[in-house]
Every structure is written in C-alpha cells, then in structure tokens.
Amino acid sequence: KKKHWKMDTYRRGQPWGKLVKVDSSETVLLFNKECTVGRKKGCYLSFPANKLVSGEHCKIVQDESSGLVWLEDMSTNGTMINMSTVKKQTHMLQSGDVIHFVYRKSEPEQSESFFFFFFSKDASPAQEKDTDSMEPENKRRKTDDGINLLGSLLSKPPVEGAKTDKMEESLTCVICQDLLHDCVSLQPCMHVFCAACYSGWMERSSLCPTCRCPVERIRKNHILNNLVEAYLIQHPEKCRSEEDLKSMESRNKITQDMLQPKVERSFSDEEGSSDYLFELSDNDSDSSDISQPLVVCRQCPGYRSDISQVLFATGSNYWLPGLPDGSAKPTGEQPSTSSDLPSAPQEYRCPPQGCHLICTCCLQPMPDRRGELNSQQVIAQQCMLCQRPFCHMYWGCQRIGCQGCLARFSELNLTDKCLDGVLNNNNYESEILQNYLSSRGKSWRDLHQESLQSLQQGNYYLTDCRISANAIVCFCCGLRAFKELAYKYRQNITPSELPAAVTSRPDCYWGRNCRTQVKAHHATKFNHICEQTRFKS
C-alpha cells in the first residue's frame, strides 16, 4: 500500500519535533520553524490525493525564543486537536496532542491523524525514542525494492552500539510509543494499551486502535503491569517523569466498574464460613461467559450465592436472576451522568425472578418493564423500529461518549457531524446542503424541525410510516430517518436558491441510486438529487 502523503526530505540541522501517524510508525520530523500542511505541492507535509485537505490547511510554528509551539488553522473545515475543532484560530500545542487534519468517523480511511511530539532543547533525535526500531521487522512498510519506506524518507545516522531491546519492544504502547503504564487489554483481540491512552481513543471509537475489532470488554493486564515494573527496576532511566504520570492519571477515564463488574463471591463450608458478600471480580481466566457470573442490575437487591441462584448469561438480550435478599444493598447506586431523567425509575426494585434487558449501547442490564402499564409516564426501553433495548430514557446510559442512544425522534441529539455525507454518502451534494444552511444561518436542528413539520403536514413521506416526531428511536435508526428527511429537504429547495454551477449539472441516469456518486469527480459532474431514469427493473 503506497503512502498518500509526501514531505520534503532535504532538511538541515536538528529537528525540534515530530508527527507520528496514528496506528502506524510513519514519522515526520519537523525541521523548519514554520511547517505548512496542506494539499499543495509546496507544503512541508502534503496530502495531494486527499480532497478533504485544503490547499494550505494549517501551519505548525515554533517560536525559538520562548520554545512555544502552536498550530494556526487556515482550512475551510477546520483542524481537530484532541477532538476539539480549531477553525481559523491559533491553538497552543503540547507533546502528546492528537492532531486530525481530516477526521471522518464513518470513513476512517479518509482521516489524516497524527500524534505531535516536541523534542526538548537538550535532547537530540538519537536520544528520542526511535519509532522505526520499536516496530517488528516483519511489520515495517517497504517499497517495491524492499527498502524501508520510512528509512528512505527520513534517513537517520545509525547510533553506534544501539541494539533492539526486544523486551522494551514488547512492553511499548503503540499509541504513546512509551512503556506501558497501568496497562489494560481489550477483549476479544487482547491488544494492550496504557489506560490513559485508550481512554482518549474510546471516546471517539468503539473499535480496537490496532486491529479495528469491536471491543467487547476491557480488562486490567496484571501480568504485563508486573513485567513493566520489573523492567523499570532494571532500567530506572526509562521511568516516566512525575509530571507525565500525573498527566496520565488525569486522562484515565476507565472506571473500576468498566473494568471489573461486581459479582457475588462466597466462602465454602470448608473455609469456615457460609456467608456471602459482594466484591470486585478479579478473574482474568479465559473461561467462557456461560461459567462466569455477570454484573447485577443497579435496581436489584442482593442475590444468594447458591449456584442455582446466580445470574448467568442466556445468549440473548434477557437476564434471568435468582432469588432476592432484602438485606443486601443494591449495587451501582451511582446516578447516571448522560442525561437528566426523573427519579421515579430509580425507586423501582426488581421483583423476584424478574427478567432483565441488556442495553445495546453500554451493555449493562436493566429491569424489563416494557409490559407494565404506567399511566404517569411511558417506560421507553427499546427502539420502536429495530426493537433493540437501550437504557438512556430509563435511567441514562453510562457509556462514555453516548449522546443519547434512545430518545424521541424530535429530541434526538445527532450532533453536528450528522451532515457529513448526509445525502447518500455523496460529499459534494452534502456540502451543497451545508452551504445552503450556513448561508441562511441554519443548523441541522433547524433542518430537522422544519422537516418534521413538513412530515406532520403531509408534505414529506418516509419509507417507514411508523416514524413521527414522537417516535422512540435509537441513534442509528434516527440518523437513518434524518438522512431520508434531509434528502426530501434538499429536493424541495428551489433551483433559484442554489448556485448556477449546481443547477447546471445534468441528472445522472442512476439518480439517487447511483453507486458512483461517492466519487468526487462523478458527484461534481452530475446531479444526484433525482430519481433513476434508466435501467429500471
């Protein structure tokens, strides 16, 4: 696979910083005091094949006198730094910041993301960690001639006496390129990262940073943590600074409840006690889920520890609990942080042998109350379209990054990114709609409300007649319905309100069903806000 970015390799002097591509060891050393990033040929770091990058996207500047480094954005869509958008502004950079010149959550292959690292004044590049040597030989990217691609772009003089430390290589986090600290492993792929590093990643993606496998569970890796501790005893010079450790502790968002759910443990008669208690599970074995007790619902009382009464997974969205014990305290009494919901559901207690649902978003159980008749409020626990259970409207979803996984369609928080590729993943047509809304001072919320009014008045018709403003839908189903409404909205914009370059394009034969409209050259040449006119079955 060829690299789709270029840089000028003729530089003199010592580099003052570097950019390391996310999920890769590809590195760009920063020599110039002002490094321009963009699509143009003369930029220090150029992305000529990525149309989402502006001609002169931004520039990274270092002030020699103060040593400060900042990023000045000059792009059309802005630059994202640590998941915060900077547009036509200047942002101070710190070592370890994640810079997204292009960020597309739905199209990760289009994203251009780099870690920024700053070299201290008294440190030479040889003293910095060499990201090339950190990667195994068989995984290094090579050119057709077998020459190391990074070595050809960023040639470095060999350090005499330097040898690859296989132990350090095995104990290195691929995100921060430093020794693992407070290591966690992801299941089922078992890739390992620093807890602080993965905390920043999981806020924007539920996939593994290394293999893109969906993450089902997070677990502490005690074995690797012990190995790192033993390695640092032998190599104290590789210990992190106190400031770095404090920073990592503050960035660690992985809570104990996320790592180890509370389960019931008991002492056998041979151990001299028949009492039972709740404690944190610390089981790192590879036994199957069928043999492991799982977390109890936060509205459940206690459960007896007899094997026939422990909570087991059933392979579906239901949990079958055992007999309650009123003397035990309910677990998980912490209130949800994702929404402000009435306290009535919190006063509920699960009945004996009551069934539970598993939230599709946070994978936590909640009591199944869909069959109850409640005159005061509707107990919404599932999407009316896909029928999947969600806990947001019941007591607030606790997954980090959840924007409201279940809500009324009119109140669904789709975020500002919902307009990206909203029209059949056609970026050109979607930008036309975004520019139209921006020129009139409107946002996606205005589009949503106006479309719902037209739907209620009978001007718009959706393929699923169950959808209305008060329909209880999940985020995925709501976004799908919103895209259909956005197409209707764009279809009803009069040609006089659009630029001449837009209205002068001929219609594509395939119309809205065209599979080539995702390509920029085709989308620019033909109009796709129309129906298919040829080859209809």
Image (cartoon, rainbow, N blue to C red):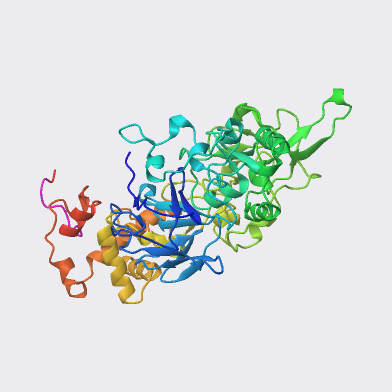
Q: Quadrant of residue 304?
A: top right
Most frequent secondary structure within the magenta stretch: loop
Q: Is residue 534 magenta?
A: yes
Closer-to-camera residue (231/194): 231
Closer-to-camera residue (156/43): 156
Tell which residue pokes out farthest to the bottom in this image.
440
Query: Residue at the spot x=19%, y=72% of the render?
Result: 499
Query: Residue at the spot x=33%, y=73% of the render?
Result: 438
Q: Is 306 rendered above or below residue 296?
A: above
Would you say 43 lies left or right of 340 here?
A: left
Query: Residue at the spot x=48%, y=43% of the render?
Result: 207
Would you say 162 lies left or right of 231 here?
A: left
Query: Residue at the spot x=60%, y=64% of the render?
Result: 340
Residue 14, given in percent of the width and then of the height, sits at: 49, 54
Instruction: Report the magenta residues as a range.
Output: 527-535
Would you say 338 lies left or right of 520 here?
A: right
Closer-to-camera residue (130/157): 157
